[in-house]
């Protein structure tokens, strides 16, 4: 089930495209042009009564109206139908991140106060470069790139806790073992454990950051691979689509170029990868891009946080890719007029 904020922002964006003057009236009208069932309409109406959601609802509705009016968007033509994804992930290898499908032609991604581009298994990012690869078993990235540091932290953690029945090796943890360890850790923050655990964790962070950066850098040995990596990071795909949302400071309404469009105007000059730390393993990335149309150099920056999913040792780590550059400054993200 989609989160409350997702329901509000995505459905109110869609309602703004349908030509209504006010979001509340639009929700009560339950237009058949928007493919939403009665239960979801009722849920949206209840959420719009909550003061905590009114600001987000108004901003999303305004964004939808802006997309309706924009010459690069709908150009004033009210759509016949809007299909909402409801948070479902569509099938396919290269998935355009569309939350709304307008008239079966316009793919719209709603991004409200989120700078996350991807949430992927680290091996898929650093080894497979975000390409679709059939991996039957999700590996523990910390163990893969920092086996000694992972084992040292695991050993120090067990020594600091009163817990029995867990294996001696971190790479032997089963899903049930991970639940047991998570429960034992729940009452303790990392700072409450021993000095040995704090030092072991700091070493793990350094080692994983360096190892991840090196693995990623090694796989991007040619200009062509670096260019394609940048496209995948930025979600520049073979089909054009739109981003409609808010970055926390101003509305975002942009058309995302295809790789073909991108190459007509831009050229990748460099793609840099650096190990970093920020409370968890981190890898910073930055690209320099020549803009032939403007005749200048543009810089895109982001970072990747590699961290356990749902808490320490609970599940294998995940890699969250963040875009640190404002959307309107990203080459290939063309603001709608």
Image (cartoon, rainbow, N blue to C red):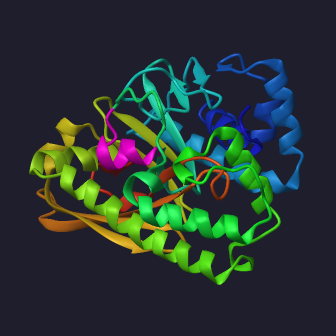
Q: How many marks?
A: 0
In this rendered view, identify the residue nearer to me: 196 or 255: 196
Q: Residue at x 37, y 57 (%)?
A: 145
Q: Quadrant of residue 99?
A: top right
Is 227 on the left-hand or right-hand side of 100? left
**Residue 293 is covered by the magenta coloring:** no
User: Whole-percent x and y of residue 91?
Assistant: 47, 20
Q: Residue at x 29, y 41 (%)?
A: 257
User: Whole-percent x and y of residue 26?
Assistant: 76, 32
Q: Residue furthest bottom?
A: 195
Q: Quadrant of residue 52?
A: bottom right
Q: Residue at x 33, y 62 (%)?
A: 211
In the picture shown, does residue 255 fall above or below 59?
A: above
In the picture shown, does residue 305 fall above or below 231?
A: below
In this rendered view, identify the residue nearer to me: 151 or 227: 151
Image quarter where the N terminus lies is top right
In this rendered view, identify the residue nearer to me: 184 or 114: 184
Is 142 on the left-hand or right-hand side of 64? left
Is residue 92 visible from the viewing direction of this image? Answer: yes
Is 28 on the left-hand or right-hand side of 332? right
In the picture shown, does residue 89 fall above or below 229?
A: above
In this rendered view, identify the residue nearer to me: 186 or 272: 186
Q: Residue at x 77, y 54 (%)?
A: 164
Stretch of the chain drawn in magenta: 120-131
User: Whole-percent x and y of residue 89?
Assistant: 55, 27
């Amino acid at each position: 089930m989609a989160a409350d904020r997702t329901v509000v922002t995505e459905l109110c964006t869609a309602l703004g495209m349908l030509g209504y003057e006010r979001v509340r009236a639009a929700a009560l009208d339950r237009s058949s042009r928007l493919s939403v069932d009665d239960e979801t309409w009722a849920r949206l109406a209840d959420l719009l009564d909550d003061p905590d959601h009114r600001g987000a609802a108004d901003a999303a509705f305004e964004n939808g109206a802006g997309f309706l009016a924009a010459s690069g968007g709908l150009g004033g033509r009210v759509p016949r139908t809007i299909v909402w994804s409801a948070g479902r992930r569509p099938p396919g290898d290269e998935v355009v991140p569309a939350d709304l499908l307008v008239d079966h032609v316009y793919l719209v991604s709603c991004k409200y106060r989120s700078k996350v581009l991807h949430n992927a298994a680290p091996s898929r990012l650093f080894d497979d470069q975000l390409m679709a690869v059939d991996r039957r078993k999700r590996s523990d990235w910390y163990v893969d790139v920092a086996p000694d540091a992972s084992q040292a932290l695991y050993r120090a953690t067990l020594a600091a806790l009163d817990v029995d029945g867990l294996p001696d090796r971190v790479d032997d943890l089963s899903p049930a073992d991970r639940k047991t360890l998570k429960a034992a850790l729940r009452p303790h923050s990392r700072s409450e454990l021993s000095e040995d655990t704090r030092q072991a964790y700091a070493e793990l962070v350094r080692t994983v950051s360096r190892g991840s950066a090196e693995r990623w850098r090694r796989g991007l040995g040619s200009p062509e691979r670096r260019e394609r990596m940048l496209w995948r990071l930025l979600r520049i795909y073979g089909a054009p689509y739109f981003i409609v949302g808010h970055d926390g400071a101003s509305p975002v309404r942009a058309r995302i170029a295809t790789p073909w469009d991108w190459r007509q105007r831009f050229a990748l000059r460099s793609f840099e990868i650096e190990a970093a730390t920020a409370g968890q393993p981190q890898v910073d990335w930055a690209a320099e891009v020549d803009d032939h149309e403007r005749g200048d150099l543009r810089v895109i920056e982001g970072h990747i946080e590699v961290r356990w999913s749902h808490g320490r040792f609970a599940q294998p780590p995940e890699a969250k890719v963040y875009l640190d550059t404002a959307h309107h400054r990203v080459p290939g993200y063309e603001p709608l007029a």
